[in-house]
Amino acid sequence: MAVAGPPTNTFGGDNFWILLLTFVLLLVPSTCVFTEDAPAQNQEAPTQQLEGFNLNGYTTGGKKSWEINGDKADISDEKIKITNVDANAFDKQKVNLKSRTGTINKTNGDINLKDNVVITAERGTQMTTDTLDWKRNQDLITTKDPVKIVDKQGVITGTGLTAHPNLKQAAIDQDVKAVLNTTKDLKPDQTATITCDGPMQMDQLKMIAVFNVNVVAVEASTGRRLYADKMTVYFDDKNKKIRKVICTGHVKAIQGVNASYADEMIYDGDDQKLTMTGRPKLVFDTSENKGSGLFPKMEK
């Protein structure tokens, strides 16, 4: 998913080097170890080792936009390697990024995080993965590894991700599984599990999640299943539940041996009604099927 980032900050360019130079000049001499011998041909340039690393970035208006802290840093001509990274990005909401190791590219300011990467947004959303690239010019984070996102709405897992650091807008590439709350009670039997091949896009500003390709939704309390090519889920942020679901493309709803087919189905979470359009077809048996939640009872 292509996500537009905010204007480029000052991480990189002249301001970056001014910050770095100022930082080095203020160091306590005992915290630095310099390599004095010139490197032989085909060897890496000398590195400077620092204990207690801290680096800050500011906008053109002088407002602090990010900070990076670490236990130790190895500085070479091209990059800075940091251990136990603890970084913060300051936008409208604060975002914290942590990992065991990280590398800053001194040319463009991009950051690569590895091992136990955790991103925590100020509102509580948290994402974990193995590796992460932070593209500072685009204000994007990306990974090709498995990811897990935990929020008040539920838990989403998958492989590969592109997102803003604040996780308000994100796309998971493939093998998506989402366990979502259908009511504000947060009970295990009041959930719906949605899987898809991907991609899946989520927008927490609009409270929407879009699942694509071979979408299957299962309601925990009844076992009802819903199939579609595409499923758009609208959330009620105030009541922490699913507000509406729109399914399109080869839509099928299964309840026991009862089945419904249509080009499009719309589920209303408030009145729990399912509206089918586009050549709807219903198949029923004579047994009683009860339940509530994501899918209503199919009336005869």
Image (cartoon, helix red, strand yellow):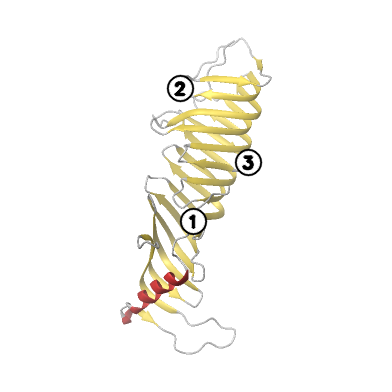
Question: In the rendered structure, which disc, 1 or 3, sits on the residue that comes first in sequence?
Answer: 1
In the drawing, does residue 184 fall left or right of residue 199?
Answer: left
Q: Residue at x 44, y 43 (%)?
A: 150
Residue type highlighted by circle 1: Asp
Which is more N-terminal, label 2 or label 1? 1
Residue 136: x percent and y percent?
A: 49, 60
**At numbered mark 1, what does the secondary structure look like: helix, strand or loop?**
loop
Q: Quadrant of the C terminus?
A: top right
Q: Which residue is mark 3?
A: 197
Residue indicated by mark 1: 139
Q: Nearer the viewer, mark 2 or mark 3?
A: 2
Residue positioned 42% across, 58% down in the render: 98
Mark 2 and mark 3 residues within 8 Å of each other at the beta carbon: no
**Gap between marks 1 and 3 measured at Cα:** 27 Å
Badge 2 is on which residue?
270
Residue furthest bottom in the image? 37
